[in-house]
Amino acid sequence: MLVGIVGKANVGKSTFLKALSLKDIEIANYPFTTIEPNEAVGYVTVECPCKRLGVKCNPQNSKCIDGIRCIPVKMLDVAGLVPGAHLGKGRGIDFLDDLRQADALIQVVDASGSTNENGEPVERGSYDPIKDIEFVPTEIDEWYFKILNEHWDKFVRQVQHLGKELYKEIAKQFSGLKINEDIVRECITELDLDPENPIKWSSDDLKRFSKKLREKSKKIIIAANKADLPTSEENIKRMKERFPDYIIIPCSAESELALKEAEAHGLIRYIPGSNDFEIISDNLNEKQKQALEFIKENVLKKYGSTGIQECLNKTVFGLLKMIVVYPVANINKLSDTKGNVLPDAYLVPQGTTLKEFAAKIHSDMAEKFIGGLNLEKKKIGADYELKDGDVVEILFKK
């Protein structure tokens, strides 16, 4: 799973990424073997089972902070975003190539209206950020449409003369964009298009189909950044009215980063996503006190959090519909073979079965799969659909 972070220059995207990265968190069994230069690691947060089970956990592939499990997610900094990217403007080709890999997108928008369409600083409030929300999906729609247009005659011939299925041919062409046959079928059905007569599809049909493909394959959440600035509140209100179907989250990357740095220096106690923090040091100077008070009054109390953690959580658990599962080697002790309690937390799609989960952990485990045990020590079978927060022991032939 890969979450793309998109946005123009000067909207606070770098600060957003840094605030999400939690670079001070060290994980013993690091889950990603390769991190490219434009990649980072964010952390979704959920309540750790250690709280409800009354045990002290010892995480290995994640981290637990005061009963909140932080689970790593790979993020991609998608650069070169300007209007006309699908035509090659800016670093358009690189931007679209990066997008291929992303499962979902967080679009960082300057809600204060202080950067224009090219990412250039302008007088605060003079630019309408609603324009930014529109142009990212439009760029992807146009890109998909361009690909379809270039190959449409071939698709028509394959269906009309070779008897091939349109679903499969389109899915094959778009496989690099994480579009499968099921997604193509859904789009065609929902738009009431005829898959057996693609020659009758108009240019408008292709554009509607391109848009529907994007909506299902590259879902977008809007991070309305710089929400602490005076001009942002009204803009955010207008954004939500104009785009009722979008998830639009007010956020302040600078506030989140400031809280993380204060926490790292032992000045405050703060858990990402919280609506408050606790000052634990007497060494704050007046400037630091004023900054923390500003964040508390103008961000945390006003919006309920800095919004940064909420953006990633809603992307992973809302848009991508992932759940968290905790495998153990010994259900009685809730531990792995080395005695680590609740050692691992895995993100898997809703609907994942126990045997599919076994394969995710290790191929040998799936091949030698027998069944599993849940927290009640009851046996569960291969087709058992895992639920969010499940703790399971997988049984397999040694």
Image: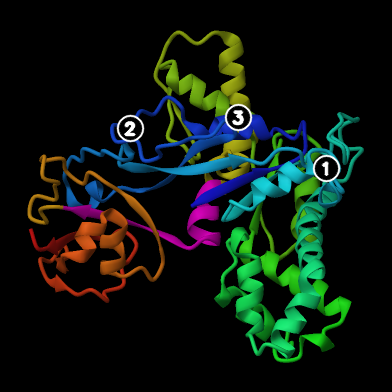
Which of marks 2 and 1 precedes in the sequence?
A: 2
Task: Identify the residue shown where x is 13% and y is 72%.
Answer: 379
Amino acid under disc 3: Ser
**Residue 353 x, y percent position in the rendering:** 31, 70
Pointer 1: what residue?
A: 82
Which residue is found at the position 62% from the left and 59% from the top? 177
Image quarter hosting the C terminus? bottom left
Q: Is residue 315 magenta?
A: yes
Q: Residues within 10 Å of mark 3 (few under 14, many from 20)?
A: many
Of label 2 and label 3, which has the lower sequence position?
2
The colouring scheme, among rainbow, by chain, secondary structure or one colour, is rainbow
Residue 32, visible in the rendered structure: yes
Q: Amino acid at mark 2?
A: Ile
Label 1 to label 3: alpha-carbon separation: 26 Å
Q: Secondary structure at mark 1?
A: loop
Residue bearing the label numbered 2: 27
| Callout 3: SS | helix
Which residue is situated farthest in the front direction here? Answer: 162
Which residue is painted at 58% across and 41% down in the image? Answer: 76
Q: Amino acid at mark 1?
A: Val
Which stretch did the figure color magenta? 312-328
**Foreground of the two, 45 or 178:** 178
Q: Could you say where residue 238 lies in the image, as x and y percent from the top left?
A: 81, 54
Which residue, given by chain and number where applicable, does mark 3 sit on?
255
Q: Is residue 16 left or right of residue 145?
A: left
| Spatial CA span between label 1 and label 2 | 36 Å
